[in-house]
Image (cartoon, helix red, strand yellow):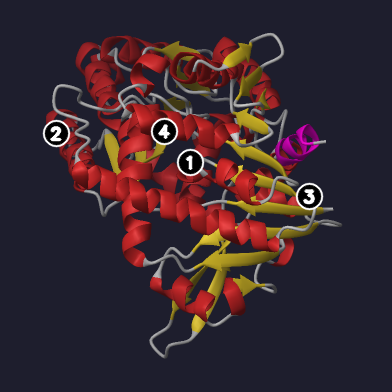
């Protein structure tokens, strides 16, 4: 059976040495791990975009961008050398600055969005970007092959591919939330319809939780006047039927624990223990992404220290805020705001013997794993999140039990809310109270809650998650 996967970022990336030599490394993430576990016995082709100049050079050195030996456990890779201007407009201006903002409800609506002629030019690039993927998939797919298209970057691809190759079985999976109709309709009418019809080109449209699937059905009904069967979860539009499914991505517990047992993690664990100095450890791990709500989370910690001075000197908040989308000014500004607030907390409450907040704005996966092993409290408070795997990784790695403070707006709340302390992510005072309750929670209660959270987190690991989507195309 041939399976093709399409995603913006692929399973491998390249770097260029000073001598001009190309070096390849495997990408991370649940999708790569999931595919590695199902690739055996499958003719797998992964189509992705060249993300850097080194990627582009690698793609140009191989016919049609096919790197047949590059994927290894994730199969052959076809890396598309899309023109730089087209890619940047599609990726930054439409996917990340428009569709991401709509689905995460991030707009400051008195001032934005502003859909003008410049946006229409960018939208044409987004269409051209999708067409490049559809052309590549149509060319590489054998008759009747299964194609799994990933995420909002490629929302138009299922329909484009359907027009080129009606014989294929096509799925689309959304890793983000889906906006409710009243917010989705911020998009220009024709573009809102095009996004929905793009996804409806698939035989199966997958989402991370019931809430996002229901929002998609609502949009199809409100924007397209499509015939929606909510019991069967199907959408009938323009003579075709698309099934809608929920596939809640979990973590591979054995793989994650194995990685966390390596020496580099042990070294960082020892350093964190010394840094904590026997104090309770509050942890958060995020990209500096606007939807992650880091500033309000730090403000909640400030309020905890302000109203509960008994915690002074007895708790340390470690915040890993890894840089994200640094080529966009508003993301750079947000990172700066996080750094300012962290400095203000330490200035206000810190002493010669105690640094209340340790902020690291640098990617260090091993240190993140070490911190997840040690945390007494894990804070995950996004404004809105498709799933949030950190909320699942924490309980799986916890050594002694970890209280989870979790936003009700994270997709993971659908599975984890019963054993987490759920909060309204906009309510700083409520979050501060949840932090206090988490710190006061008994060791026995933490262990019991953590065990149940870990069981839920590993219920559908990446391999089973991907296999479930393939089965939905049968």
Circle 3: is it few (<14), some (14-19), or many (20+) Cα within 10 Å? some
Circle 4: is it few (<14), some (14-19), or many (20+) Cα within 10 Å? many
Secondary structure of the residue carrying numbered label 2: helix
Residue named by callout 1: 371
Majority SS type along the magenta span: helix
Of label 4 and label 3, which has the lower sequence position?
3
The residues bearing labels 3 and 1 have C-alpha atoms spaced at a distance of 30 Å
Q: Nearer the viewer, residue 80 or 24?
A: 80
Residue named by callout 2: 344
- Front tag of 4 and 3: 3
The residues bearing labels 2 and 3 have C-alpha atoms spaced at a distance of 48 Å
| Left or right side of 213 for 317 | left
Q: Residue furthest bottom?
A: 19
Of label 2 and label 3, which has the lower sequence position?
3
Numbered label attached to residue 25: none
Residue shown at the point (35%, 50%) measured from the top left: 124
- The location of residue 73, given as percent across then percent down, is 73, 62
- Front tag of 3 and 1: 3
Res 337 quadrant in image? top left
Tell me if residue 47 comes above or below residue 241 in the rendering: below
- The location of residue 242, given as percent across then percent down, is 66, 27
Tell me where the magenta segment starts and ends, as one range.
Answer: 465-473
Circle 2: is it few (<14), some (14-19), or many (20+) Cα within 10 Å? few
| Left or right side of 267 for 235 | right
| Left or right side of 386 for 158 | right
The residues bearing labels 4 and 1 have C-alpha atoms spaced at a distance of 7 Å
Residue named by callout 3: 38
Tell me if residue 305 comes above or below residue 463 in the rendering: above
* Residue 22 lies within the magenta run: no
Residue named by callout 4: 283
Q: Nearer the viewer, residue 318 or 117?
A: 117
């Amino acid at each position: 059976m041939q399976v093709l996967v399409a995603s913006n970022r692929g399973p491998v990336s390249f770097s260029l040495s000073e001598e001009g030599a190309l070096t390849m490394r495997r990408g991370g993430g649940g999708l790569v791990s999931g595919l590695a576990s199902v690739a055996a016995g499958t003719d797998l082709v992964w189509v992705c975009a060249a993300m850097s100049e080194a990627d582009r050079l690698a793609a140009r050195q191989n016919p049609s961008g096919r790197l047949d030996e590059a994927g290894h456990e994730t199969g052959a890779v076809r890396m598309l050398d899309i023109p730089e201007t087209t890619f940047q407009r599609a990726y930054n201006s439409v996917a990340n600055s428009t569709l991401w903002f709509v689905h995460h409800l991030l707009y400051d609506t008195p001032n934005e969005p502003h859909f003008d002629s410049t946006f229409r030019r960018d939208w044409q690039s987004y269409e051209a970007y999708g067409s490049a993927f559809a052309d590549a998939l149509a060319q590489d797919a054998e008759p009747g092959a299964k194609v799994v298209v990933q995420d909002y970057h490629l929302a138009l691809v299922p329909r484009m591919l359907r027009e080129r190759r009606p014989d294929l079985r096509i799925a689309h999976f959304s890793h983000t939330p889906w906006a409710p109709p009243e917010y989705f309709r911020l998009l220009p009418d024709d573009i809102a319809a095009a996004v929905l019809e793009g996804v409806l080109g698939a035989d199966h449209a997958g989402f991370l939780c019931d809430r996002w699937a229901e929002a998609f059905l609502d949009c199809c009904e409100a924007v397209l006047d499509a015939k929606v069967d909510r019991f069967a979860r199907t959408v009938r539009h323009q003579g075709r039927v698309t099934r809608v499914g929920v596939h809640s991505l979990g973590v591979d517990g054995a793989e994650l624990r194995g990685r966390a047992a390596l020496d580099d993690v042990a070294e960082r664990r020892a350093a964190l223990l010394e840094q904590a100095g026997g104090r309770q450890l509050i942890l958060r791990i995020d990209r500096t992404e606007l939807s992650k709500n880091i500033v309000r989370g730090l403000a909640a910690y400030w309020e905890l220290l302000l109203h509960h001075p008994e915690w002074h000197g007895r708790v340390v908040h470690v915040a890993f805020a890894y840089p994200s989308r640094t080529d966009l000014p508003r993301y750079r500004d947000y990172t700066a705001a996080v750094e300012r607030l962290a400095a203000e907390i330490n200035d206000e409450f810190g002493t010669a013997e105690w640094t209340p907040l340790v902020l690291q704005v640098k990617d260090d996966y091993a240190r993140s794993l070490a911190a997840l092993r040690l945390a007494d409290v894990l804070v995950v408070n996004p404004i809105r999140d498709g799933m949030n795997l950190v909320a699942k990784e924490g309980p799986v790695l916890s050594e002694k039990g970890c209280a989870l403070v979790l936003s009700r707006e994270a997709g993971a709340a659908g599975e984890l809310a019963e054993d987490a302390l759920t909060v309204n992510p906009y309510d700083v005072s409520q979050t501060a109270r949840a932090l206090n309750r988490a710190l006061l929670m008994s060791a026995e209660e933490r262990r019991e809650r953590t065990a149940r959270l870990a069981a839920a987190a590993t219920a559908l690991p990446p391999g089973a998650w991907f296999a479930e989507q393939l089965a939905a195309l049968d």
